Amino acid sequence: MSITYIFQKSRSFGIKKEFPGWKNEDVLKPALHALEFTFRFVSIVLSDPRPYTNQREWRRRLESLATSQIELVSLFCEDDKLENVPIVDIGKSGGVLTREGSSAEVWKLNECDQEAQVLVSQVSEESLLPRLATWKKSEDIAQKIMYSIECEMRRCPYTLGLGEPNLSGKPSLNYDIVCKASELHLLTKTPPEQVNVNNYENRTLFTTHQILESWIYVAYQLLKRIENEIDSKSYESATSDCYILQQIWKLLTEIEDLLLLMDPDDFLRLKNQLDIKATSECESFCFRSNTLVEITKMSKNLRHKVPYILDVEVDPMGGPRLQETAMKLYRKKHSPLKIHLLQSLQAIETSVKKFYYSYKQLLVVVMGSVEAKGNLAFMTVDSSDTLAQIFLEPTYFPSLDGAKTFLGDYWSHEGKRK
């Protein structure tokens, strides 16, 4: 069995539009799915019976991963309008708590004061996070994640409703009808279902790729939105989304790095059990994810938006028209929004290349250089090494690169004159 099955299985949950007018539904649903998979990952790690696993580092990594994801979720939520978001505002219920949907917790501020403010915080009934908070092994991790939600969502008009204190008394997202965690956790069986693989690392590998594929899908939806925003000249929104996309590429690297904590012997045995192997010397395991390949192409293809942003046609003779226009934009600063957008496009490029460079090194550490590529020349760069070609290829934005080169040269000469 190839790793392709793992990617296909992790994408088996569908994302369909259910809330008309909610702009962020397409990106928030898979992001919340990834967060929920992370909560399950905490349970898997803390239930691991093997005495030789590095539990301490696993706890740290999963806390960090959860915080990184919550930060990205909050970035999407900042500009949401409450009228379009499925929320539960218990504060407007007259103090009556329904027993349908989600449960609630009551928080009282300034208990010594007779007129203490009472806040009611929504708590999801389906999410694993509130359950982790009641388990002694995971109580500290769950509390830290809840306080991360409280901190990261402070600029948002609502909070997530996962048991965080909600000290601002904001409305809560109706998490259970958006995420549908109970349906999501039906996907807990690790492949292959028809074969009994007695190897605990199977759960680690499978859950890691479920989280990875969820965020890859977020990136795919976000890239489509960025293209539309640029085409409609919504440069400020496009810039914000480009920087979020840059953060997602960084997150993908953080997710993949979890595999560094797997036990070498158990993983390599699992690799043999699942028959995980590349079908050719130039193919890397990451390319088995069709959506990852697609978002890589889409990230590169944002370079075709540069002439439109600069409002200049490409010179068919190969002249420096684009480069000169970009240099004038940088010098005169007559349109800061365009500068911000161009900078954010190049920021995406840096994160894409970092992801593939990091992935190449990950393969070497996890499997060994010979096993990772199939020959002793793995660390060399040759025409058949597709992975190396990605992070060593020329800049996606040669016109912007040239403009900065000549701008630097201009200021170098100006400095000598002074």
Image (tube, grey):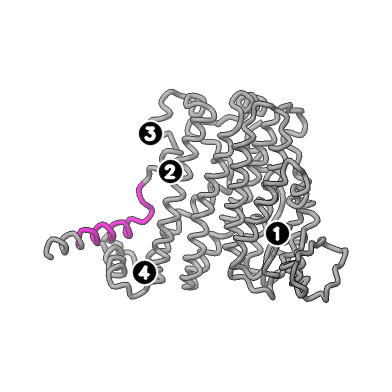
The label number, if any, that marks residue 206 in the structure image: none
Q: Hey, which quadrant is residue 257 in on the image?
A: top right
On whether residue 405 falls in the magenta region, the answer is yes
The secondary structure type at the circle numbered 2 is: helix
Residue assigned mark 4? 310
At label 3, the amino acid type is Val
SS state under label 4: helix
Callout 3: few (<14), some (14-19), or many (20+) C-alpha neighbours within 10 Å? few
Closest to the observer, 411 or 268: 411
Residue 416, image x and y in percent? 13, 61
The reply to whether callout 4 and callout 3 are in contact (CB within 8 Å) is no
Query: Which three-letter amino acid code belongs to the residue tagged 4?
Result: Leu
Give x and y (percent) for residue 373.
48, 28
Front of the two marks 2 and 1: 1
Q: Which residue is mark 1?
A: 164
Quadrant where the C terminus sits is bottom left
Spatial separation of the CA atoms under disc 3 and disc 1? 49 Å
Judged by depth in the image, the label closer to the viewer, 4 or 1, is 1
Inter-mark Cα distance, 4 to 1: 45 Å
Location of mark 2 (residue): 390
Given residues 328 and 91, the one toward you in this image is 91
Alpha carbons under labels 2 and 3: distance apart: 11 Å
In the rendered structure, which disc, 2 or 3, sits on the residue that comes first in sequence?
3
Q: Residue furthest front?
A: 112
Residue 5, position as x, y percentages in the image:
67, 38
